[in-house]
Amino acid sequence: MKMESKKRFRKIVSLMLAAIMMVSVFSVSVPQTAEAATPSLKGSGSSSVKITDSNCYGMTKKANYIKFKSNVTGYVTLKFSNNSRIMNAWGHVTFCNSKKKALGVREFFNTASSNSAIKMRTYGVKKGSTYMIKVESEGGVKVSASVVSVKKSAGASRGKAKSLGKNKTVKGVMIAGSKAGDWYKIKLTKKQKLHISYSVKTNGLTQNGYCTGGIKFTLYKSNGTKFTNDFDYANLATPKNGSIYCLRNRYTGAETGLNPGTYYIKVEPHRASSSYKTSSGYYTLKWK
């Protein structure tokens, strides 16, 4: 959409929203003098909050904040659906701490999109922690939350890495605002290729469709050095991924299995560049 068209569209929408707000004002018989309490989502299970056309950012130029205090350590998935009488709502969401400080990037959503990645976000949360969800929407929007508990059993360091068995799947969570990683170890008893697969539910999508981060997976040797300088990650655009680790002859290119021994996998929040904050969310990891 060209810039002039965007400006014209926003002007029309603002006028229509203004008309709706005027109707709402005249329909209220008793003036409200007290400021409305901050709406909140439940700390477990499913719940939702609705933002009206007259209260949306496009009308007031003020962001709406939704309070969320998690009853579990795990993840919360937010879904944005239309609550407007005149348009398909769209805008931005920022996941913040209790003091409204951003824990991630300002992300784009559009309720009219058929792509779930554009209207859903997942964040890792800690039991007892309070978060503020900043919503800047053009048009009324319904914000639904689904909270899932995840037992965190991975090791906090390489020395405390959790064993990952063949054909076993482990689950974990990256907490929003934390840079801490999870460690797993794999013991190869014979020379073989190492096939790892993983999936994520995460966040980090800007208005131009760029994924700012995700969850990162790195293989380490038994001596603590990286297997290669490269790493793998999964994000909103590619929520399922995997790698086959092997040795390659530098002259012939022939591939052989890894030598017997213990290998480590570190799972941690990832950001696409230093200009972005890290992502968070849920992951699964499997040695196939």
Image (tube, helix red, strand yellow):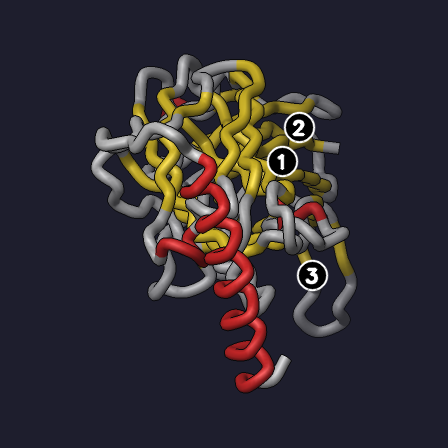
Residue drawn 46% across and 47% down? 54
Residue 260's label in the rendered image is 1
Q: What SS does tag 2 mark?
A: loop
The amino acid type found where label 2 is placed reads: Thr
Residue 124 or residue 33, whichever sits in front = 33
Residue 39's label in the rendered image is none
On the rendered structure, is 252 left or right of 285?
right
Q: Which residue is mark 2?
A: 189
Residue 255 quadrant:
bottom right
Residue 215 seen anywhere in this rendered image of the structure: no
Image position of 121 with respect to 92: above or below? above
Q: Dot 1 surroundings within 10 Å: few (below 14), some, or many (20 or more)?
A: few
- The answer to whether mark 1 and mark 2 are in CB contact below 8 A is yes
Q: Which residue is mark 3?
A: 248
The number of discs equals: 3
Residue 43 or residue 180, whichever sits in front = 43
Q: Dot 3 surroundings within 10 Å: few (below 14), some, or many (20 or more)?
A: few
Residue 38 seen anywhere in this rendered image of the structure: yes
Alpha carbon separation for disc pair 1 and 2: 5 Å
Q: Position of residue 253 (x, y in %)?
A: 75, 68
Image position of 287 with respect to 163: above or below? below
Residue drawn 60% across and 65% down? 209
Q: Quadrant of the C terminus?
A: top right
The amino acid type found where label 3 is placed reads: Arg
